[in-house]
Amino acid sequence: AYIVKYGGFQSKLSQNLLICSGFGRVLLFCVSMNSGHIGGFLFPIMTIGLIAGTVFHNSYPYVPYGLCVGTFMVSIPSGIAPMPYTLTLLSTIIFFFGTYQTIPVFVSVITAYTIICGSGLMKMISLKQREKEEKKKLLLEQQEADANLSLSHSDAGNSDLTQRLIEKKEADEYAFSKYMGMAAKK
């Protein structure tokens, strides 16, 4: 009864602990996503939103706790994931919101989605990432071509090795084009 009446355990945690755990969660999420760990991004970002909603409620206690947590929980991931209606329904169903409580959640989700995805910010970030990958690929191809050229000029006996490298590269390119063709058909 105490947990429900007095806002749960969020009033027991200090503001600094919540903020530090939120930033720690963001840092660990970034490390795990960039180091190749398997998993999605939606639920870790939702927990970051839960922490942010609790921090907001502790800062402004006159705003209802459920509304803070329900709003922040889905507005933060909606800036990254282009599914505003699904996230609104998720928060509405989890927290049993009615019509009047759903409106602030929907407005926050649409605002976050419009600012990040609708403004073209995500597309710009992905284009920059793609350009970096293409530059790396061109650099590797140039280094491989230089290595092949130096192998062919250094020793005529290594022409077999050079021929194998060229055949391997052609086979890799053929397999990649077939894979991309299969992926485009699906």
Image (cartoon, rainbow, N blue to C red):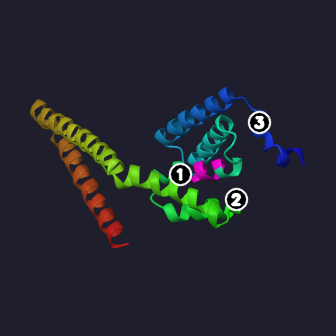
Q: Nearer the viewer, residue 28 or 184?
A: 28
Local SS, label 2: helix
Whichever of labels 1 and 3 marks the residue nearer the N terminus, that label is: 3
**186 on left or right of 155:** right
Q: CA distance from mark 1 to mark 2?
A: 15 Å
Q: Which mark is residue 75?
A: 1
Local SS, label 1: helix
Give x and y (percent) for residue 107: 51, 57
The three-letter amino acid code for the residue at tag 1 is: Ser
The three-letter amino acid code for the residue at tag 2 is: Phe
Work out which quarter of the rendered image holds the C terminus and state it: bottom left
Q: Residues within 10 Å of mark 2 (few under 14, many from 20)?
A: some
Whichever of labels 2 and 3 marks the residue nearer the N terminus, that label is: 3
Q: Which mark is residue 95?
A: 2
The three-letter amino acid code for the residue at tag 3 is: Ser
Q: CA distance from mark 2 to mark 3?
A: 19 Å
Local SS, label 3: helix
Q: What's drawn in magenta, residue-wise?
A: 68-75
Up-down: is 147 above or below 38?
above
Q: Which mark is residue 11?
A: 3
Q: Which mark is residue 27?
A: none
Q: CA distance from mark 1 to mark 3?
A: 23 Å
Identify which residue is drawn at 56% across, 50% down.
39
Q: Main secondary structure of the magenta part?
A: helix
Identify which residue is drawn at 35% across, 66% down.
183
Whether residue 25 appears in this view of the structure is: yes
Give x and y (percent) for residue 99: 63, 67
Outermost right residue = 1
Identify which residue is drawn at 64% across, 48% down.
68
Whichever of labels 1 and 2 marks the residue nearer the N terminus, that label is: 1
